[in-house]
Image: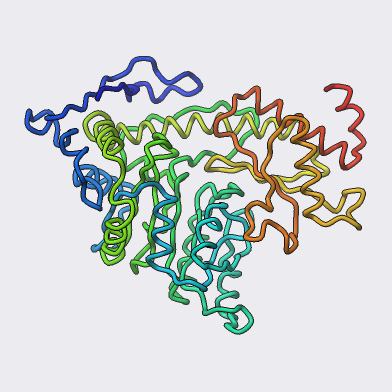
Amino acid sequence: MDFEVACTDGFETVGKKIPERTTPIHAGKHDITTGSSTYDLATGLQYGVATGSKQLVKFMTEHIQLIHSPPYRNWQTILSAGNTSAFEIVLRMLGQTGEHLLVEQYTYTTVFETGLPLGFKFAQIGMDKDGLLPEDLDHILSTWDEAARGGKKPRLLYTIPTGQNPAGMTQPLPRRQAIYRVAQKHDIFIIEDDPYYFIQMPVYQPGATTTTTLVTSVEEYAKTLVPSYLRLDTDGRVLRMDSFSKIIAPGARMGWVTASDQVIERMLRAHEVSVQNPSGFSQVAIFKLLNDSWGHLGLIKWLAHLRGEYTKRRDALLEAYDTFLPREIVNWVPPTSGFFAWISIDWKQHPEADVKSTLQIETEIYDAATKRGALIVPGSWFLPDQGKGGMEGVFFRMTYASSSFEDMREAIERVGKALRVIFQSETAGMVESRL
């Protein structure tokens, strides 16, 4: 098996294509026998152990120690078949039918699609520009009424702390510390789903030129990242899910999970009767890339390169927001991590706000944007009941992950046009004539 990867000495270049100078990688059948590698196809394509290959587990365990340095001894890392699979296994492993899962007010739709068939209910926690509110979490848990809520006090908190999907906010360190203290107070176990952890970006500055910081050590790079819940976890009450999907290749369908050895042992047993282990091809390819080619410093250089590239993409989308969205109707907080930029619509300014529900107004905006060829994701899709029980506000998620700068700009211009027409803005005529 042969493939090529970018050379790490080109990763400091932002705004250009991935360097054309590449390094060939070969994965042979008998690399272990010949002494050219500690992992090969003869091993990787056999039935594997449920932890994932010991070679790749070793590398990812070293990575966890370098980046997160969990403050207790008996933690372990296991490979997963991606975060969606890992989350489903975690719910089966730690939860019970009929209990409530604590989640952010708006959260990743797969959480509901996974939890509902397993019999879970959801207790939504309020959010602000810094993410999940610890005081709301504490209030809900302190005043939990089993009869009124229809279930026992929750034991599990699911959170996407960095570049939250869909709202894009990142919990700063003081917020994470406060939430962890609430978890200690109420004996809550935290499921930390953090696929965007390495897509942390500088604060948005209109017109600024994006540069990539030269990375000279893993330790120095780690200091630029907001500490994870795993790094704060003195009690062993955090299970952290990481993924290769946002940093290497979604098609690899592989990630890694870190928690106490007791929890990982249970996950190992669950793997034995479900996914067994990730694809052997994926494990061999990623091991050859990370261990035999890049090493830990090379991986960090790649992650720093991604940070720079996504910063440029985020800035392009936000510049389009500034140019085309009507500020009298739309508000947003520039994201500092992840792939998503969340907008809030002042629905009360809608001409029929007194007779239309927020869900109806959201649907009207979505339909108008779609008819103009701009696909935006309604906020109601990130609620357990998809807004059927009523919504406090109208929100939309947009992404800068893959579209070209030109397409992003064109899409936002069309969204701005749709909003001005619907809300009968004074500038609607001007925008119509320009388009």
- Does 241 sit left or right of 261 as displayed? right
Does any portion of residue 398 appear in the rendered image?
yes
Relative to 54, say whether 230 is above or below: below
Residue 208 or residue 73, whichever sits in front: 73
Q: Quadrant of residue 289?
A: top left
Relative to 43, say whether 260 is above or below: below
Residue 123 on image: x %, y %:
58, 68
Residue 232 on image: x %, y %:
39, 61
Residue reaching furthest to the top? 20
Q: How is the image coloured?
A: rainbow
Q: Quadrant of residue 140?
A: bottom right
Residue 341 on image: x %, y %:
63, 42
Count how many numbered circles sit on residues in the image: 0
Residue 335 or residue 357, whichever sits in front: 357
Image quadrant containing the N terminus: top left
Q: Residue at x 46, y 76 (%)?
A: 185
Residue 372 or residue 155, whichever sits in front: 372
Relative to 248, say whether 349 is above or below: below
Q: Quadrant of residue 73?
A: bottom left
Q: Residue at x 21, y 46 (%)?
A: 48
Q: Residue at x 61, y 49 (%)?
A: 167
Residue 338 on image: x %, y %:
52, 42
